[in-house]
Amino acid sequence: MTVRALSTPLPRRFALCAVALLCWVGTMTAAPAHAAPAPVAGAAAATTFADEFNGAAGSAVDGGKWQTETGDNVSNHERQYYTAGTSNAALDGQGNLVITARKENPANYTCWYGRCEYTSARLNTAGRFTSTYGHVETRMKIPRGQGIWPAFWMLGDDLGSVGWPNSGEIDIMENVGFEPGTVHGTIHGPGYSGSGGIGAAYSLPSGQAFADAFHTFAVDWAPDSITWSVDGNVYQRRTPADLGGRSWVFNKPFFVILNLAVGGYWPGDPDASTSFPQQLVVDYVRVTTGNTATGGTITGLGGKCVDVAGAATANGTAVQLYDCNGTAAQKWTAGSDGTIRALGKCLDVKDGSTADGAQLQLWDCNGTAAQRWAVSGARDIVGIQANKCMDATGNSSANGTRLQIWTCAGTANQKWTVNAA
């Protein structure tokens, strides 16, 4: 495998499946839709990434958040050439990003099949933003037509070192034009990639088409689980139990991708019924840490509160369980950088350790990974660096029980309820 610079398209390979997007989903089975679970009462989410796409009409996306890939894609046999600049990706001045696919070749671009017939755009956050866990959401209005293939998805940040599919791929939303009322959510990894990807489809009722209105597409991503929803309706959840013993590669950082492809193995090529230009209109992209503290308590085993011992502010002060008493030592806030804070300092893993049993303490906020946390919909508080859960030592709820990190096990001493002030 040749690793390419990220200013060009991500590595191209596999004649029958793609690093870019899912090639074929014939193995998918639909799961029944049901209402999304309600968030923890009174809790709020810490936003780790947000682009509302506000700006002047015709302006480029924020280069501090997104990079634009260029080139064609042979692995899927897609037909478009992804361009730089604002010709195919620009703000519309009304709070949207518009990615436009056109039937054109203004610069004599060359594709795998010869002279390119179409242009479009693909954006990613690699090198700008990655996330491990959280709620990843977009609101968009997709295009329509045979051969049109919009997608909102994620790739493992270790792509360059381990390759695809070992990096993992989370397809939050894909639509192929011959299914105007259906979208797909899929995971890919070693032994379950391409046509073997594991996922499900969601269809609108009464013959509606997704291109007729804006819709919200999201995943709730926690240690060892990913849950997909459309407009708040959950339609599938995947865990390691779905993999038949194959490796779950989704407990690590991923980056976000938006693109609009034309043609390929899965959607097929455009035909006489397909009109151009086609536009993917994106209202926003947001990533939040889930239910996180905003000036309130965090309660755990026995209804006890997460507490700073003695309300001390010295570096190294123990973080423990204690009877809830309404003091400042039990008031926690979530920073936009993924930190959880009390008394002006950060929740920290002692010595930056990733070992089971590493103790939690209060420390000056210093921007290290040992102070970054994600709160899952399953009420786990997960240390990003170690990918381990906040845990009450010894399964004890006694006053003074020291908190630590430990391999996530789903046990009661690793479950936390966040309450707003």
Image (cartoon, rainbow, N blue to C red):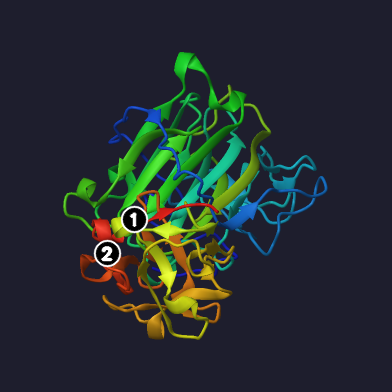
Tell me the element at label 2: loop
Determine the image quadrant of residue 7.
bottom right
- Where does residue 191 sit, x and y in percent of width and height? 24, 54
The residue furthest left is 245
**Of the residues shown, which amino acid type is indicated by label 2?**
Ser
- Where does residue 66 sit, x and y in percent of width and height? 63, 59
In percent of the image, x 66 and y 41: which residue is there? 283
Is residue 87 shown left or right of residue 257?
right
Is residue 360 shown left or right of residue 264?
left
The residue furthest front is 325
Is the residue marked by circle 2 packed among few (<14), some (14-19), or many (20+) residues within 10 Å?
Answer: many
Q: Nearer the viewer, residue 206 or 144?
A: 206
**Quadrant of the rendering where the N terminus is positioned:** bottom left
In percent of the image, x 20 and y 55: which residue is there? 246
Circle 1/circle 2 CB separation < 8 Å: yes
- Where does residue 33 sit, x and y in percent of width and height? 37, 28
- As displayed, is residue 253 above or below residue 87? below
Q: Which residue is mark 1?
A: 303
In percent of the image, x 17 and y 49: which residue is there? 244
Tell me the element at label 1: helix
Is the residue marked by circle 1 packed among few (<14), some (14-19), or many (20+) residues within 10 Å?
Answer: some
- As displayed, is residue 206 above or below residue 346? above
Measured Cα–Cα span from mark 1 to mark 2: 8 Å
Q: Which residue is mark 2?
A: 397
